[in-house]
Amino acid sequence: MLRWETIRKDTSYGIPPNLVDYDRERAGFSWSAARVKLQGLPDGRGLNIAHEAVDRHAASDRATAVALRCVGRDDAVTCVTYKDLALATARFANVLRALGIGRGDRVVTLLGRCPELYTTVLGTLKNTSVLCPLFAAFGPAPVAERLRLSDARLLVTTAELYRRKIAGQRGELPGLRHVLIVGEGTDQPAGTLSFRALMTEADDTFTIPPTAPYDMALLHFTSGTTGTPKGAVHVHEAAVAHYVTALYALDLHQDDVFWCTADPGWVTGMSYGIVAPLLHGVTVVVDEGDYDARRWYRILAGQRVSVWYTAPTALRMLMRTTPRTGPYDLPRSFDLSALRFIASVGEPLNPEAVVWGRDVLGLPVHDNWWQTETGAIMIANFAGCDIRPGSMGRPLPGVAAAVLRRGEDGRAAVVDGHVTVLEEPGAEGELALRPGWPSMFRGYLHDEERTAAAFADGWYLTGDLVRRDADGWYWFVGRADDVIKSAGHLIGPFEVESVLMEHPAVAEAGVIGRPDPVAGNIVKAFVALRPGFDATTTMRQDLLAFTRRRLGPAVAPREIAFDRHLPHTRSGKVMRRLLRARELGLPEGDISTLEKDTSEKDTRSQGKDTFHPERSPSSPERTEQSA
Ligand code: ATP
Ligand code: MG
């Protein structure tokens, strides 16, 4: 485990946290009781996410509260109240109905973070159709593949994206009946319809049809970090988990101004950028622009954001521009006094980033863990509890987690249909969750085999390796596929990467195992340096010595390569499998979710990428320097 000092819970908070006594809250929790927090459709017609997120507030004294505060690329702000959103989503549901799109039909979005995206998502759910969001920076091939895989019936996009990514292959997508084009003006590609014109004609009253809690609502493709992206199916009942987890793990209170920086093309941007905060009736900040340190601080300050949910990669990028110590102190030139809670997800959060938050932003970062498949946060650091930097925290109320013994292949060992739960503190194994939480995925679309393989002996197997300490805190070790076996040791890449990132010159690191005839594997690190540091032999030796001192020779990297462009998924995660494939000269596999280099106009001019590590002017493109 990582030895960083525990950050004691802040007892001076202005607003009492929603979860103060962890054990008591867990003991008294049940999902059926939690469901009462949602209203349900009138006359017992079921449970629909859009009713809970929009119509319920529109019919209450929250009607005139701002639901969405959209910050345009030019910083112009457009506010949408809950009432506005109720009317717009009713119109969109009527548009779908008029076009013959009904229950269960897939509606796909390929849009930036514009107001129409939010109308489409929630209007689709009202109509009991299924929403599948795609990240707008995907190229034509991944877009077409996902349109096919999802059985898309209707697509909402812009004229430019349509021409560049769809038009050429429309003929190969016979199931795609309609394409709606968002945007002002008269640019209407052949074979498409105008979103605006249809909305103007549509009626703004709509009665949500009966919706069963287990009706399919959302289809999400995974990030593709470990292989081909999978389409995870989620149902309307997931809203119960979205509500509860935002209450506990994001500590949402009704007067919060909440900003989730993830794009709704990914599950975080959908579950926590749209659904969960609207369920709580808070104000959601939507930034149409891209990552830029100054812009982000401007939004945090200018929009008076109180709760901020972001990603480790983004935090590390902010850290690059604002070291913990040093003369350049960007955040302190902004008024961040409204900010009261910061959380992060998506990748391991190195302890240094947690502490950087406390020292530079005035608040520690609360890491939490979940997956596309879990639909909602499962393990978290809570506002009212201590933080152990480097730990993902503890399971949420209602979530039963376990550490399972691993077999030869690195995954949980299943013997005669049974798994072994490891109880002893510090034992390392595959993280498993007991099915029963409402946002659990109901399968990978069109892939029963993969779905079945994700469950064993009454557990959902996450594919992630963890340790649980004696007090029940979970520590991420690595993905089952990423763990390195070296000279009889099992090494989690995260621990090595975290230590590397403690070095003042290191901005980011990706660690892999490289086959070695003697040790089985040796640890190899790919390192991106901060601006102002040079990739020299001295630097390499310094890093090797630094990690050896902290980790010992058995775990420290034996080789270090400097690499300005660590491969990331478009959702911002380091793709270790790609580092390994490139290192070993193996096929790169599915790279549809690989974040493209900024030199590619396709992504940059569109600017839809959420995160773009800046290019360090001083480090060379890539220097191989092996020990
Ligand atoms: P794919 O399943 O296609 O390989 P992916 O697993 O990256 O892609 P997501 O569902 O977006 O797709 O990501 C979930 C994964 O992200 C988790 O299984 C875990 O490996 C990682 N992750 C999420 N949060 C954390 C965290 N707090 N600490 C460490 N890892 C995390
Ligand atoms: Mg995964």
Image: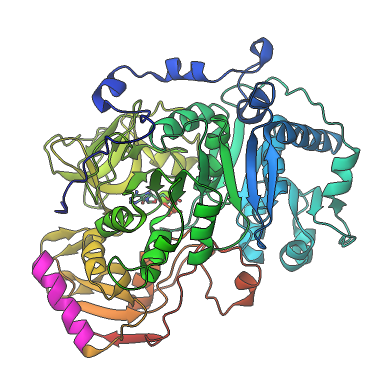
In this rendering, position of residue 155 left or right of residue 419: right
Is 541 within the magenta?
yes
The residue at 62%/18% (across/down) is 46
Q: What's the magenta region?
A: 538-553
On the image, which quarter does residue 93 sit in?
Answer: top right
Quadrant of the rendering where the C terminus is positioned: bottom left
Near-viewer residue (107 or 285): 285
In this rendering, position of residue 526 left or right of residue 50: left
Counting from the top left corner in percent of width and height, residue 179 is at: 80, 51
Q: In the image, is residue 452 above or below residue 35?
A: below
The residue at 49%/32% (across/down) is 242
Would you say residue 452 is visible in this rendering?
Answer: yes
Near-viewer residue (429 or 410): 429
Counting from the top left corner in percent of width and height, residue 180 is at: 80, 50
The residue at 21%/52% (across/down) is 408
Counting from the top left corner in percent of width and height, residue 430 is at: 26, 44
